[in-house]
Image (cartoon, rainbow, N blue to C red):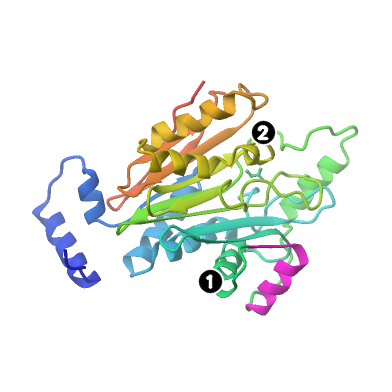
Amino acid sequence: MEPIDRKTFLATAGAASLAGAAARPSVAAADAQDAVFLSTWHWGMEANRRAAQIRAHGGSLVDAIEKGINVVEDDPNVTTVGYGGYPNAEGEVELDAGIMDGHTHRAGSVCSLHKIKNPISVARLVMEKTRHTTMAGEGALQFAIAMGFKPMQLLTPGALEAWLKWKNTPNHQTFWIDGEHHDTIGMVAAGGGSVAAGCSTSGLAWKLPGRVADSPLVGCGYYADDAAGAASATGDGDVMTNYCTSKHIVQKMAEGMHPQEACADLMRYMARSARELHTNMYCVIAIDKRAEIGALSMNAAQPLQYALWRNGQGALHTAPHFL
Ligand code: GLY
């Protein structure tokens, strides 16, 4: 079949929607309307909306994922991602992010990045401007500055107050924030026969300085391969890293599993040995190259909300749980 240029494609898609089937869209219709975006948590709604705008203006899936995730990184009210993220035990905000293009099979990531509020954009430049995949700490910061990013204070007054409260609590024993445990923005996308994935986080609040978990590690926090699909993980990254979650799910999709079944297969694998299965947060999202999706949490106590953008509309859902 001849490749179709974007203008013709959009005209065809527009005509199709004017012809106006109001019925539930099929996968084929979803493909005709181009990209589908699937993101973690309620903030994924705005991220998806932005990603869809970027895509509608001719952006690639990688453009869309980067700019979508930027929305959450820029939001000071999200205390687990980017600007406003809770700091490490020493009061320093340390950010992790990674992005992968399923078409080129290239990934880029940054770990323990200080002072730069958009680590996903730095990760993208690692992928596109260097022959490296992962950059960490001071080297990542210097790379970001060389790429034109401006260092800034990422600790908001609210995050400082929360950190001081933790610091001044006698015998504080947990590294988890009391209350909501939502952590990353993970996003996967499918469109035009390709897939992509990205993930960004400030990580565990009050973590030991230098701690890196699943989010910026290719195959763990995110993975994308046009041959099968894309996946992302959210939750206790110290544990999930040990299961190469996203690679596991994409591998299972490559073997023919539906994304939902691939997510369940990962949970089955984790359930053999992971700790605190009924209380800890282990959650995943997945999309295959036909834009079929999967989303699953390990347990009912830590439910996963995910945001789905399909056919020009966004919706927030609660994923099923495995146990
Ligand atoms: N899943 C994010 C983290 O544990 O840092």
The image position of residue 279, as x and y in percent, is: 63, 24
The reply to whether the magenta stretch includes residue 103 is no
Q: Quadrant of residue 257?
A: top left
The image position of residue 105, as x and y in percent, is: 47, 60
Mark before the other along the chain sequence, 1 or 2: 1
Q: Which residue is mark 2?
A: 179
| Closer to the camera in the image, 206 or 103 | 103
With respect to residue 41, does 274 lie above or below?
above
Q: Looking at the picture, which amino acid does disc 2 mark?
A: Gly
Q: Of helix, strand and loop, which one carries label 2?
A: loop
- Mark 1 closeness class: few <14, some 14–19, many ≥20 residues within 10 Å: some
Q: Which residue corresponds to the image point at 33% horizontal and 70% vertical from the top-left?
A: 58
Residue 160, labelled with which disc?
none
Q: Looking at the picture, which amino acid does disc 1 mark?
A: Glu
Compute the Cα span from label 1 to label 2. Answer: 38 Å
Q: Is residue 231 left or right of residue 24?
A: right
Residue 302 shows in this picture? no
**Which is more foreground, mark 1 or mark 2?**
1
Q: Which residue corresponds to the image point at 44% horizontal and 36% vertical from the top-left?
A: 295
The image position of residue 146, as x and y in percent, is: 67, 79
With respect to residue 222, does 12 lie above or below?
below
Q: Quadrant of residue 16?
A: bottom left
| Closer to the camera in the image, 214 or 50 | 214
Main SS of residues in magenta: helix
- Mark 2 closeness class: few <14, some 14–19, many ≥20 residues within 10 Å: few
Q: Which residue is mark 1?
A: 128
The reply to whether the magenta stretch includes residue 139 is yes
Give the residues in magenta: 134-147
Residue 12 shows in this picture? yes
The image position of residue 280, as x and y in percent, is: 64, 28
